[in-house]
Image (spheres, rainbow, N blue to C red):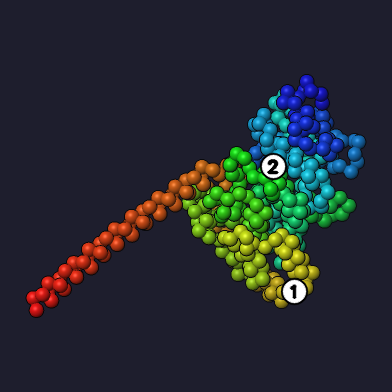
Amino acid sequence: MNNTDDPLKIYGFIKNKVKVSCKNIKMIEYSETEDFERIAEGGFGIIYKATWNNKSLESYSSIVAVKKFLNSQDIKDFINELKSFDQYHNRYEHIIKYYGITQDPETRDHMIIMQYADGGDLHNYLQKCFKDITWNDKLAIILEISRGIDCIHEENYIHRDLHSGNILSVKNEHSTSYKWHIGDFGLSRPANITSSNNKIYGVIPYVAPEIFVGKAFSKESDIYSMGMIMWELTSGCKPFADSEHNADLILKIVDGKQPEITNDTPECYVNLMKKCWDSDSSKRPHIKEIRKTIGMWVHKIKDIDQFYEAETTRLKLIEKRKLGPEYAVKTHSGAIYTSRLLNSLISSSSSISSSSSTSFNTKQEYISKELAFDINDAKWYLYNLNCKN
């Protein structure tokens, strides 16, 4: 693709401004892609399943995912994802692989071509297969997720948008088994760089409470999100699905609202999950600690009896129809699980909080004055009574 096909000078921009190594980025002719099938849409773009007629590299699958950025004339999100791609450069097993970039010659929209997750996302997997997913299976899944997060944090990056829709299942190239990968790095940033535009995107139930009160995303906020994914594995449901995702829910999360623990969840798992939810972000465990703990559970080094009992309880609850997404409360029509701009809702929650605080203080002041009057009145009465004597 030459410069005349690229009015935004994207390739020159990549070389000169973004400081991304172009040897890691394959420029793919749009004509090499075909059979686009729309499969998902989020706050930043549309995901298609497509065929990539790539005959030069046999190791790359011909079936790919193509992410088209909405309003990609503003290429900030596109560039951020390219930076993340260059940072990981397909080096990690539990990170979705990126193959290259292309551009629609008609719309000028920029696209990233990446590994297709033929097993779907974690939420859909839980919806379809929950009753058959044992505690051993759950631990294996969360261990793979922890490995992916560890890779991201090891590179000193923050994902900033972890939720079950971004946890993707990919079939192993040389077997019939599947592995879980982390995808969608449009919001990821280096841990030492904060966003300059103060825009906050995310899915409310997975966003750490400190973000709602003005603190920056961090590795610790990723850990909070992971705690919510841990809970989702136990219930088969997305957190706070029965609530509208509005300013009121944000206030409740800031005040410490947490999902209800299922009856089959082992105490050791609950303890780790709640550590991930700690309102004090500095007290949340490091990803390496989480990975080590889950690894010991998977390899049956510790807490064996707890997980044995948990599996027995799980089967009983399934049999009694007391556990699983099909028996959960109906999802609220205002529950939104795609990443979106949250600034207006956060501002509304702050206004509600300030208004409630003002109202409370006014009421307290009124009560205080009323009590002061009563006390003085009593003193006056007693004084006069004593004088008469």
Q: Position of residue 179 (x, y in %)?
A: 79, 55
Note whether 19 is above or below 266 in the view shown: above
Q: Quick check: can you spot residue 103?
A: no
Viewer-side residue, 174 vs 298:
298
The one nearer the camera, 322 or 373, is 373
**Image point 40% across, 53% down: which residue?**
356
345 relative to 360, above or below: above
Callout 1: SS: loop
Q: N-terminal of the two: label 1 or label 2?
A: 2
Q: Mark 1 and mark 2: span between their CA atoms?
A: 38 Å
Residue projecting furthest to the left: 388
**Residue situated furthest top in the rendering:** 4
Residue at position x 63%, y 54% from top? 221
Residue 302 disc label: 1
Q: Amino acid at mark 1?
A: Lys
Give the numbered dot on residue 186: 2
In terms of depth relative to the viewer, which is nearer, 171 or 355?
Answer: 355
Name of the residue lying farthest toward the bottom: 389
x and y percent of residue 130 in the render?
68, 60
CA neighbours of label 2 inside 10 A, class few (<14), some (14 to 19), many (20+): many
Q: Is residue 193 above or below residue 279?
A: above
The percent position of residue 226, horizontal first and vertical second, equals 66, 57
